[in-house]
Amino acid sequence: MEPVPLAMDLARWHPPASRRPQPDADVPALATWRVRPDLGAPGIRRIRTGLAPLDGLLDGGFSPGQLAELAGPQTSGRTRVLLGTLAGVTAHGAWAALVDATDALDPPSAAALGITLDRLLWVRCGRRLDVAWRAADLLVRSGGFELVAVDLGDLPPWTLGRTPSGVFVRLQRAVERAPTGVLIAAPRRVAGSLAAVAVALVPQRLRWGQGGPGLLAGLEIEARLVRSRTRAPGAGVRLRWTVLETDRAGSETAHAGARAAPGAPG
Amino acid sequence: MMDGGARVAPPRYACTWVPGFAAAALVRQDPALRGHPVAALRGASLRTVVAVTGAAAARGARPGMSASEAATRVPELHARLEDLEAERAATGALLDMAWATSPRVELVEPGCLVLDLAGLTALLGDERKIGERLLAAGETIGLPVQVGIGSTRTVARLAARLGPTVLTVPPGDEAVFLAPRPLALLAPPPDLAAALTRWGIETLGALAPLPTPALLTRLGPAAVQLQALARGADLGPFVPHLLPEPCREAVTLDWEVPSLPALAFVLERLLARLAARLALREAGALGLRLTLQLADGGTHAHRLGIAAPLRDGRTLGRLLRTELEALRLPAPVVAVALEAEPAPLAALQTDLFAPPRSSPRELGEILGRLAALVGPDQVGAPRLRDTHHPDARAVGAFPGEPSTPVAGAPPLWLTGATLVRRRLVPARPARVECQTGRPVRVEAEGLRGPVVAQAGPWRSAGEWWADTAWAREEWDIALPDGLACRLVRDLTTGEWAIDAVYD
């Protein structure tokens, strides 16, 4: 049997975009493509988000050696996707770094989501964007982190727009030589064409609970692929989340304060 | 019955001795002097030689000479004033070298240590290997060490003074070893030495067999002590040096250095010596304390915190330069001291199936540079504090202590049934209109409008027993543009703020 050249072998897993089935507007993209979330190209490691439809949209997850972007306004699930991806990285023993431009990380939320905190390096930048980029550059060049996430939080567009494009060129050059993935989460896209993958998150519907521990019961959003080097952009999936209930359950037994039940008199 | 008692091995000692210690300390401070004849001088106007290096001794310079006589005998002599800081640092380095071999070390005199070798041969090999290990360590710290090994501390000290490298006196051979040695090796008092010379006693072997009572009667107790030493006996008990020495290196500059960049090469030398000492301690530096003596008599102290223990001299140098970039001094620098805060190196267990991680050195450098960039308390692993306090966010050392995984349900990041909070730092003060105790309209920076949905309140309080007491009320609210956030009211002040967004 004649050995299959590597390029052909990879092509078998990555058919040209023209031969792939095109997503129907009414049918979730995941159902059309039938891609297992943990199944990317063979031999290529993926950084999973943990959300099966989104991983399907991304061919198994984000790729190391690439710059990826998550763009979305507040309450669009952007932080949920970011922290979920960090949780996936730390869950299998790797180190991840979070460059937190606005000090927005809520460690209890991160821990409840499943992030192994002792493997997460948290860099708090105090709303200094230039410091955040320099920190990200240092971390990417170190090569010891599987994922370097840059959370730009709620920085206003005029601040984001002041980032020189050279920052992204430098970051992209660094990451393509490193076994590291870079994921930038921001209210809007910032890296332009230097990002290999960009996902836009658009909130669709807030769901309100009826008498549960919290009023806010969940969120439904649409994740749309707006840039990809491997498939035509435009495909989207719907994601649904419910509110983290452990926060309100008050199940902690040893703490320095006391927490009253909902609605209890103060 | 005493037959079952464990046999106690006869004691063995090693002595490390640095010839011309004060001069050797000067050479250690300035490696450019290595191989040259160097003399350490003492005195203000009439300077005398207190120590010389081997190269100077070979050319005829001796301690006790005047500086001019030594310079006449050795024209190429480098004569420097003795530097107590350099000697202190060299003593610390010698102790580090000794403690890297034996836990029981006695500081006999500056430049001379005795190590108890009990039980070490099983760990480190035979005595010859232990001696060679000490020689190599001496080379590492920049001091020309001679090693002697014997059954008593006196024999070991005498052997160290005789051998160019390692001289081992086997057990039982002490008398044979000592007999031909000149009496001058014991440095007897001059009058006693003159009396013994008149008697024709010039070697240890001639003094040792003399009847002790007669010696005491004729020459006094000093002669008895000298005889005991000539027989190889120890005059006192072994007194181990217990206090850990500070890991400190210092240099007094021959000239005034006006700017910090010009100090870079001085700091490099100090850091290289500190790195060698940290390596002997199997430790890294978790902090560096820099003390600069200024020409106007002032002192400037600076501490560099390092996120992870680190001992690579060049990396430490980069971190220190980054830290000092913005420092401006009122006067030139005349002396520099650098002290490391030793800490065990972070142990990283590699995993065959886990992705590769940075080495401790690389990680320490990265953490150090990040700390210089954002501040040492702003980088690390997130830490959960055992409290409901809203600002209970903290960072700890990275990587943190591994936590115990919780068995059972799949993690939430895989189930998708979670929405997380994003903190707003600082919390945005808000003006809130309430009806029947419930918020109906909110105004804050970037947020304004009627509350379309709400839930709450959740009240919490804590630390009521202290000045840091807090009490607050939380509401989940939704605004017309779809923003879901957490509205909080400080129950002690009644002020409202938005401190988190659901995202």
Image: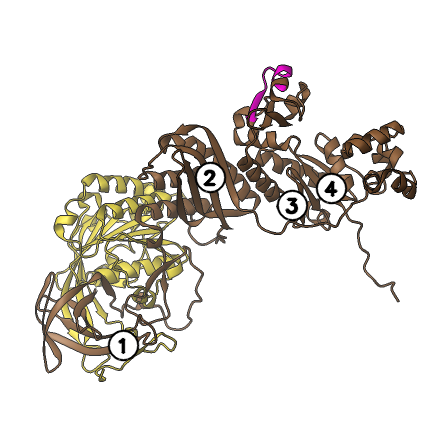
Chain colours: A yellow, B brown
Which residue has dot 3 on it? B101
Tell me the kind of residue under disc 2: Ala
Under circle 3, the secondary element is: loop
**Which disc number belongs to residue B127?**
4
Query: Label 3: few (<14), some or many (≥20) within 10 Å?
Result: many
Is the residue at mark 3 from the same chain as the one at mark 1? yes
Place residue B481 in its image quadrant. Answer: bottom left
Residues at discs 2 and 4 in contact (Cβ within 8 Å): no
Q: CA distance from mark 3 to mark 4?
A: 12 Å
Q: Is B7 left or right of A248, judged from the image as shown?
A: right
Query: Which label's residue is closer to the chain start, 3 or 1?
Result: 3
Q: In the rendered image, is residue B338 in sight?
A: yes
B421 to A157, vertically: above or below:
below
Is the residue at mark 4 from the same chain as the one at mark 1? yes
Identity of the residue furthest to the left in this view: B449
Under circle 1, the secondary element is: strand
Chain bearing tag 2 is: B
**Which disc number belongs to residue B460?**
1
Return the x and y of residue A263 as percentages of the image width and height: 21, 83
